[in-house]
Amino acid sequence: MLELASLTAGYDRHTPVFRDVSLTVAPGEAVGLLGPSGCGKSTLARVAALLHRPDGGDVTVDGRTVRGWRHRAPRELRTAIGVVFQQPRLSADPRLTLRDLIAEPLRATGRRAEGPARTAELAHRVGLTDDLLSRRPHEVSDGQLQRACLARALVLRPRWLVCDEMTAMLDASTTAALVAAVEEYRDEHGAGLLAVSHDRVLLDRWCDRTVHWASLTRAPAFATAPMKGS
């Protein structure tokens, strides 16, 4: 179970983005989080992905309460969660080829030897041809780069996926391809999914259930949320 319990989080303790938010995702379940831009849902996604420390509340992953965040989180918890962000160009190292981008988590966890086979497998899964793998981010489209970012999120075989507006900048055909790749992976591995979006139609078609942000918060988010697309 991925459990977010009574979370309060922000970037300034005096002006939190949200207060007292709780949400659970069961193994194998796809939960959609629906809300307008600026409401705080991207901040919640970063907390769920162990990338941002909340000011209060608990995050529990597979029965284990999280005590460290980002690189201070235990490796077994960090690698249990794969995350895809809205803007691939902000989350991709421009110096890396797409091949190296996909394999980056394997190198970081001492599993470099798995890189060639795993990269080839995932490139095929997300629809990247061999010629694209040798290109760098500035040499490919946003859709092609987001395919590589999804492959990177899957490379360590995570048990949980957090997709934060993953398809917001993409055309309909690329959106369909990426959702299909996520669902294929989930069918094979039983992974749970938290999908964040402002698109109700997408979430209703993709997820087992959709939760509206307004139903999670007892108090409205502050208007001065400091992060774009939150």
Image (cartoon, grey):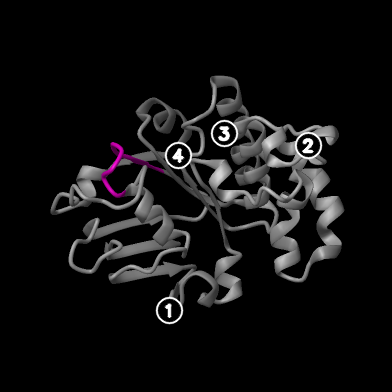
By secondary structure, the bulk of the magenta-drawn segment is best described as loop
Residue type, mark 1 in image: Arg
The answer to whether mark 4 and mark 1 are in CB contact below 8 A is no
Is there CB contact under 8 Å for labels 1 and 2? Answer: no
Q: For the residue marked with disc 2, what is the amino acid? A: His
Question: To which quarter of the image does residue 132 belong?
Answer: top right
Residue at x-position 54% and y-position 47% = 90
Q: Which mark is residue 179?
A: 3
Circle 2: is it few (<14), some (14-19), or many (20+) Cα within 10 Å? Answer: few
Q: Count the numbered circles shown.
A: 4
Q: Residue at left 51%, top 46%?
A: 85
Establish if 128 lies above or below 10: above
Q: Quadrant of the N terminus?
A: bottom left
Q: Which residue is mark 1?
A: 67
Element marked by disc 1? loop
Whichever of callouts 2 and 3 sits on the residue coming sooner in the sequence is 2
- Write down the residue under mark 2: 124
Q: Residue at x 38, y 40 (%)?
A: 209
Residue type of the residue flagged with mark 3: Val
Q: Residues within 10 Å of mark 3 (few under 14, many from 20)?
A: some
Outermost left residue = 219
Instruction: Report whether 153 appears left or right of 214.
Output: right
As drawn, 62 above or below 157: below
Q: CA distance from mark 1 to mark 2?
A: 37 Å
Residue that numbered label 4 is attached to: 165
Q: Which residues are magenta?
A: 32-40
- Please tell me in which quadrant of the rendered image residue 182 appears: top right
